[in-house]
Image (spheres, grey):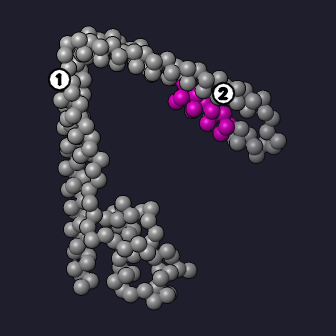
């Protein structure tokens, strides 16, 4: 029985086309995984701009933070505290809602009588699934109370976050560029071997 790679052999595919089709299964073609198998390889892979964009956004935010006046810093610190409080309240409500729904279903499962001994493990499985979801989704202790920081303390923390984000994203961008260059070298060598 032919595979997705060998079916075209039965239709007379050339050696070079077969090689390139099979190359799609290699890590070099990771970005092509959702494309149709007969889509040609690009001449060159290009790095994602995701990390470069994140680094630029962090640098931009850092510049914005450094330009804030003391009054603006206090206003932003208060606004951030308010957002944190609202997010915590929302999370706690979602925890309570989820717990109520999971608990109601758990009660129904616990009351259910399996129709045969072969169904006992199935019931246990349903209980396990619900209990895991309760443990994971309904732990209100994970989201501690928000802390109101003074403007200067908040600013120092935000500057640190943006500097770390910029450095991390810059490193990730360079790693992405190095990976893509390695993929392009692999592809170039493959094509040269087929010339």
Is 96 rendered above or below residue 163? above
The picture quadrant where one finds residue 35 is bottom left
Residue 101: mark in rendering = 2
Q: Nearer the viewer, residue 15 or 106?
A: 15
- Percent across and percent down for residue 17 are 37, 82
Total marks in image = 2
Q: Name the residue under label 1.
A: 67
Q: Which residue is painted at 41% across and 72% down in the image?
A: 39
The prevailing secondary structure element of the residues shown in magenta is helix
Q: Which residue is painted at 34% across and 71% down in the image?
A: 41
The residue positioned farthest toward the bottom in the image shown: 12
For residue 8: magenta?
no
Q: How crowded is mark 2: few (under 14 residues within 10 Å), some or many (20 or more)?
A: few
Is 50 rendered above or below residue 41? above
Magenta residues span 124-140
The picture quadrant where one finds residue 99 is top right
Q: Is mark 2 on a helix, strand or loop?
A: helix
Q: Do the residues labelled 1 and 2 touch (CB within 8 Å)?
A: no
Q: Which residue is painted at 65% across and 23% down in the image?
A: 100
Q: In this view, does 70 lie to the left or right of 82?
A: left
**Residue 172 visible in the picture:** no
The picture quadrant where one finds residue 191 is bottom left
């Amino acid at each position: 029985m032919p595979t997705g790679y060998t079916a075209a052999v039965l239709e007379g595919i050339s050696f070079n086309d077969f090689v390139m089709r099979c190359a799609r299964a290699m890590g070099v073609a990771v970005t092509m995984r959702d494309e149709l198998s007969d889509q040609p390889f690009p001449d060159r892979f290009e790095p994602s701009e995701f990390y470069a964009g994140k680094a630029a956004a962090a640098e931009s935010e850092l510049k914005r933070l450094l330009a804030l006046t003391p009054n603006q810093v206090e206003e932003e610190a208060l606004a951030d505290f308010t957002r944190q409080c609202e997010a915590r309240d929302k999370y706690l409500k979602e925890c309570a809602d989820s717990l109520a729904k999971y608990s109601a279903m758990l009660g129904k499962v616990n009351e259910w009588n399996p129709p045969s001994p072969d169904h006992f493990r199935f019931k246990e499985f349903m209980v396990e699934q619900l209990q895991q979801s309760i443990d994971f989704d309904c732990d209100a202790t994970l989201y501690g109370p928000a802390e109101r920081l003074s403007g200067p303390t908040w600013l120092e923390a935000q500057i640190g976050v943006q500097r770390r984000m910029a450095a991390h994203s810059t490193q990730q961008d360079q790693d992405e560029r190095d990976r893509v260059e390695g993929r392009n070298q692999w592809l170039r060598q493959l094509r040269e071997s087929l010339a």
